[in-house]
Amino acid sequence: MSRLVVISNRVAAPSGSHSGAQGGLAVALQSALREHGGLWFGWSGEQTETFTGALHETQVDGVTYATVDLEEQDVEEYYEGYANRTLWPLFHYRTDIAEYERSFAGGYQRVNERFARTVAPLIRPGDAVWIQDYHLFPLGAELRKLGVENRIGFFLHIPWPPRRLLATLPGAKALAETMFAYDLVGFQADEWLQAFNEFALEDMGARMEGDMLHVGHRRVQACVFPIGIDAAEFVAMTQTTRARLTYRQMRDSAVGRDLIIGVDRLDYSKGLEERFQGYERFLEAHPEEQKEVFLLQIAPPSRGTVESYRRIRASLEGMAGRINGAHADYDWVPIRYVNRGYPRDVLAGMYRAAKIGLVTPLRDGMNLVAKEYVAAQNPDDPGVLILSRFAGAAEQLTEAVLINPHSADEMGDAIYTALRMPRDERIRRWRALMDVVEQKDVAWWSRAFTDALLTVEVAG
Ligand code: GDG
């Protein structure tokens, strides 16, 4: 059986067993690696003055974890620059804040070359290589230049933008061409796959034969593999002591009011400003509901060195303060806005205590919070998921209350409807959602991708 080589920007800490402290993605990739035996390679998170390429290696359960330090300039140009200030905003439709800096593009290319040169000697004949996400688009092409002929797959965790948006990126075609170094590319949702196909067909002169896209001598199979969560683990987590305690504390502190919950990395793609506006619209349209509900928004800060993230943070603090100032009373605050993270079992208890899960990204590759909220519900009295149509998850979670997050009216109405939804309808919708979350879990996702990679027809 082939070994698996996973390459991503960062590598999860090695863990011998299934650990609740880790995200589902890390757990899924580790279990795929344990199954196949293999290697996980990426950046250590450490910075040095000059790049040495020296490997830090550890072995746990037959899996090798190999990381490499990056130079300070690499981190600035590749990670904070091209990945997070150019590609992330552009791929989330924010051309207004995407920064097109030559030095960023240069640093991105340099780090991908450095990754390729460092990892290539570790790849053995017969290994299947699986590259993760937008930090590493050109890595496959760089590996091919070094003579790596193995099966190489790529999975994109974020959206692929519409072709006219992508066209605004200097070097867009060259970036898209690097996708043809892969044998298999995976997207979260059909919308992103279609956008990729359109760019390839319209802007790169690709042709489609069967389910393969051809450009020149290269061909690639592009498919949808919606990522999931470890649903069984999440359900079990709601029964832990800490989750139960959190659940009780939430209920007690709610004093009979209905809790609406939002949980997001503090990121402008998550639609937090629009969420606060929609919630305020609900309060204004239904004054009788004031004091009957409150919104708990958990938003741990991320990417704090990037200016646009500092801006969104300041803006949300201002909005929460203004809305609370306008509507609060001595015994009620409409928004509890919390800028810190919590352990996963605590989150599970909070989700379960919430009557509504409010997930309103303006664009999101998938969105795992929506799936976690569903998995955490009490089957006899589940809450209602309100979900943005612009999350990849909306293609699968069609029994959620789907909304346009740009419309405060629509969001306000959805909150009102959800609070009044009869129990039998809540159960019916939840059951349909839970079927998807359980069947298409993260183990299904990693198996579907690796199976496809091992069986895709390769050229030559
Ligand atoms: C990218 C794509 C895609 C959040 N707050 C806390 C916490 N979280 C956890 C959530 C969830 C994860 O972070 C966030 O995942 P999302 O999928 O919602 O969003 P991104 O971080 O943007 O992820 C996304 C994903 O990759 C996977 O492919 O779905 O579209 O953008 O698991 O629970 N976890 C803990 N404390 C917190 O306070 N422990």
Image (cartoon, grey):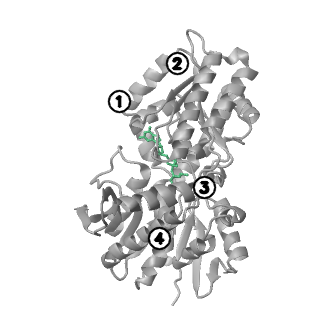
> Where residue 404 sits: x, y (%)?
72, 42
Where does label 1 land, which residue?
241
Q: How far apart in space, not on screen, are marks 4 and 3 (Cα)? A: 18 Å
> Under tag 2, what secondary structure?
helix
Where does label 4 land, which residue?
109
> Under tag 4, what secondary structure?
helix
**276 in relation to 365, above or below:** above
**13 in relation to 137, above or below:** above
> Where residue 52 sits: x, y (%)?
28, 69
> Type of residue at label 2?
Ala
Q: How far apart in space, not on screen, are marks 4 and 1 (Cα)? A: 48 Å
> Type of residue at label 4?
Gln
Taking the spot 31% from the left edge, 56% from the top edge, the residue there is: 46
> Type of residue at label 1?
Thr
Q: Quadrant of residue 226?
A: bottom right
Q: Earlier in the sequence, mark 4 or mark 3?
A: 3
> Under tag 1, what secondary structure?
helix
> Type of residue at label 3?
Ala
Beta carbon of the mark 3 residue lies under 8 A of ligand 1: no
Beta carbon of the mark 4 residue lies under 8 A of ligand 1: no
Nearer to us in this view, 324 or 410: 324
Q: Earlier in the sequence, mark 3 or mark 2?
A: 3
> Under tag 3, what secondary structure?
loop
Nearer to us in this view, 216 or 455: 216
> Where residue 130 sits: x, y (%)?
44, 69
Label 3 packing within 10 angstroms: few (<14), some (14-19), many (20+): many
Where does label 2 land, which residue?
254
Q: How far apart in space, not on screen, are marks 3 and 1 (Cα)? A: 44 Å
